Amino acid sequence: MSFAPIYPFLHRLLKPTFPQCLWSGRDDSPTIALTFDDGPHPQYTPLLLDVLDHHKISATFFWLGACVEDYPDLARQVYQRGHWIGLHGYDHQAFTGLTATELKATLNLTKTAIAKTCQINPKTLIDVRPPYGLFAPQTLSYLQRWNYRTVMWSIIPEDWARPGSSIVVQRVLNQIQNGSIIVLHDGADGGEDVAETVDRLVPELLQKGYHFSTIDQVWSALPHL
């Protein structure tokens, strides 16, 4: 059973309920963001990087700390090509099942792995996307207290279920609007098709007049910042 048709309704419900999360960018500008979860992956991420390079697109990657440790050279490639990096936890455990101590630990482990691998200031690693998109109000309270920014999405085409690139592309095109944040996956689940999907999707979005930003650029463009 596909839950893809439900996600747009959930987005409209959750966005005003949890305004401290980033659900989308400005609605008065044709700026959108491509984001990728669960990597880096040794097979799928390099193919995706080549596609992003070909189209000259900067994206945002929400990484698992364990994958960064397993594939440090690949992680460095992603960072050195100018993409923005966020945290997705160390090993994709749902944040809602963790104590405050465990949550802080998984974020610290991930941040340390990225900072050490990419030789960047850990203080710049402030964007967090909860695995599975699951959080509780207490989760958000912890993240705010620890000076993280919680990043969600406005378009989630359920690519991890591998419905095929054509369907994923069409789901995105059906929902795209100013400020959309699109989540795709370059990890073990969904990554098989991600390069093909992005290669087909980007020209369609460019033709519609959209341009791409990183999540950091999306935050910076919000009027209340």
Image (tube, helix red, strand yellow):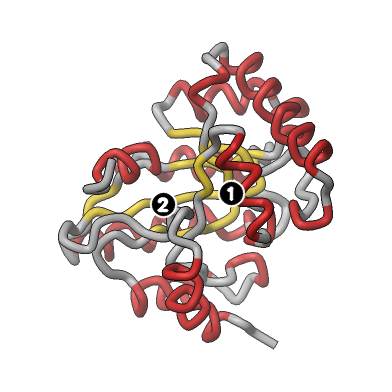
Quarter holding residue 125: top right
Q: Nearer the viewer, residue 106 or 187?
A: 106
What's under tag 2, amino acid-wise? Leu
SS for callout 1 = loop
In x, y percent, where is residue 185? 59, 55
In x, y percent, where is residue 21? 48, 54
- Left or right of residue 197, residue 212 in this image: left
Residue 90 at least partly seen: yes
Alpha-carbon distance for marks 1 and 2?
A: 14 Å
Residue under circle 1? 129
Q: Residues within 10 Å of mark 1 (few under 14, many from 20)?
A: many
Q: Is residue 39 above or below residue 71?
A: below
- Left or right of residue 135, residue 178 in this image: left
Quarter holding residue 206: bottom left
Q: Is residue 63 above or below residue 187?
A: above
x 66%, y 59%: residue: 135
x 76%, y 41%: residue: 103
Q: Residues within 10 Å of mark 2 (few under 14, many from 20)?
A: many
| Quadrant showing the N terminus | bottom right
SS for callout 2 = strand
- Left or right of residue 71, residue 102 in this image: right
What's under tag 1, amino acid-wise? Arg
Q: Nearer the viewer, residue 195 or 160?
A: 160
In x, y percent, where is residue 197? 47, 61
What is the number of the mark on residue 34? Answer: 2
